[in-house]
Image (cartoon, rainbow, N blue to C red):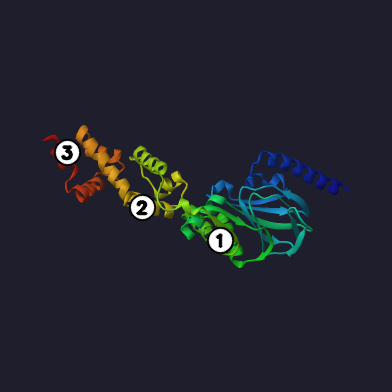
Amino acid sequence: MRERIGKQVQQETGARTMARVSGTGALVTPEQIPQWIPGNLTRDSCPLAWEGITLKGYCYTELEVEIPKMRDFMIVVYRSGSAEMSRRSGGPWRSERVEPGIVSILTRAEQSQWRWSKPIDVSHLYLSQPALAQVAGEVFDRDIDDVEMCDLVRAEDPVLTAMMATLEHELNAGGLGGHLYVEALRNQLCIHLLRRYAKTSFREYRSYGRLSSAQCRLLTHYVEEHIDQNISLAELAGELQLNVFSLIRKFQAEFNCPPHAYVIKRRIEHAKRLLASQDLPLKVVAASCGFSDQSHMTRWFRKTLNVTPSEYRHSISTQ
């Protein structure tokens, strides 16, 4: 009796908390999930600060819970225990038997109810919407409007279980290039989900083609403001909320050159102004214009102007 009352209190408390959060329109993060699904945390990747992906493990007793609108997609891999797993979202319950090796998939931003009949040990893998949308944009080479996945109570997917096991091993053992390794696994996971479970919608055709005048102004301003720094394609694409492939295509159509060539041109123009107006050491000019060193600047001056920076400065001073 005491246990039943305790579970009822947990469920009612979770429901009240969810109602408050749902009322504000907030999406729940992986760190907040235990407020709705109380369990014993057994593993956690948060201290490692993986980007776009979070791994957590839990031991649960039998429960019936309200799962709020989550910020991320969630993949559940069952590690031990066998139970009847049921789900509903505004309709009748759907039930399936789950056991070790079986996978459940929960979409993001959708409220649902889940219940299971016996204790279970699970691994949760949370995947962010931006991470999945970025990979989708690169896979389809189009601007992504949204990526959706349907909730699945039961799926037999050895690829997902193998990826989960690999990420768990990385969490426990670590190794050289850990963040790069996890990023590669995350991208593989995204592609697998896009192939088998996801529905992708694209932006209207009018968003393709050339950059708008406002986008051009934003890009040129960004390059000028960051001319002394390393400017990546991802940063330029992020300024316009495009994927990298769309940026390259539209940039080429608008500027008649790829982004890298444009940035080099702006670096050279900036260097020419500094060489003509100030008696700065060449290495200072190179650093101020974003070249990796003086030799890097010299190579580009020779390639584009057929003179070295010193020769250019001399020619300006004698005019």
Residue 52 appears anywhere in the view: no
The residue at which mark 3 appears reads as 313
Secondary structure under badge 2? helix
The spot of residue 189 in percent (x, y) is 55, 60
Q: Type of residue at label 3?
A: Arg
Q: Element type at marker 3?
A: helix
Quick check: 12 left or right of 312? right
User: Is 294 or 262 nearer to us in this picture?
Assistant: 262
Residue 194 appears at what percent x and percent y? 56, 61
In the rendered image, the vertical position of residue 189 relative to residue 39, given as above or below: below
Q: Residue furthest left?
A: 318
Mark 2 or 3, which is nearer the eye? 2
| Amino acid beneath label 2 | Ala
- Mark 2–mark 3 Cα distance, whole angstroms, equals 34 Å
Q: Decide: few, some or many residues near mark 2? Use Cα within 10 Å; few <14, some 14-19, many ≥20.
A: some
Query: Foreground residue, 45 or 199?
Result: 199
The residue that label 1 is drawn on is 194
Mark 2 lies on residue = 253
Is residue 202 in sight in this rendering? yes
Q: Position of residue 253 (x, y in %)?
A: 36, 52
Q: Amino acid at mark 1?
A: Leu
Residue at 79 percent of width and 43 percent of height: 12
Above or below, 88 against 281 in this view is below
Q: Nearer the viewer, mark 1 or mark 2?
A: 2
Task: First in sequence, mark 3 or 1: give its number.
Answer: 1
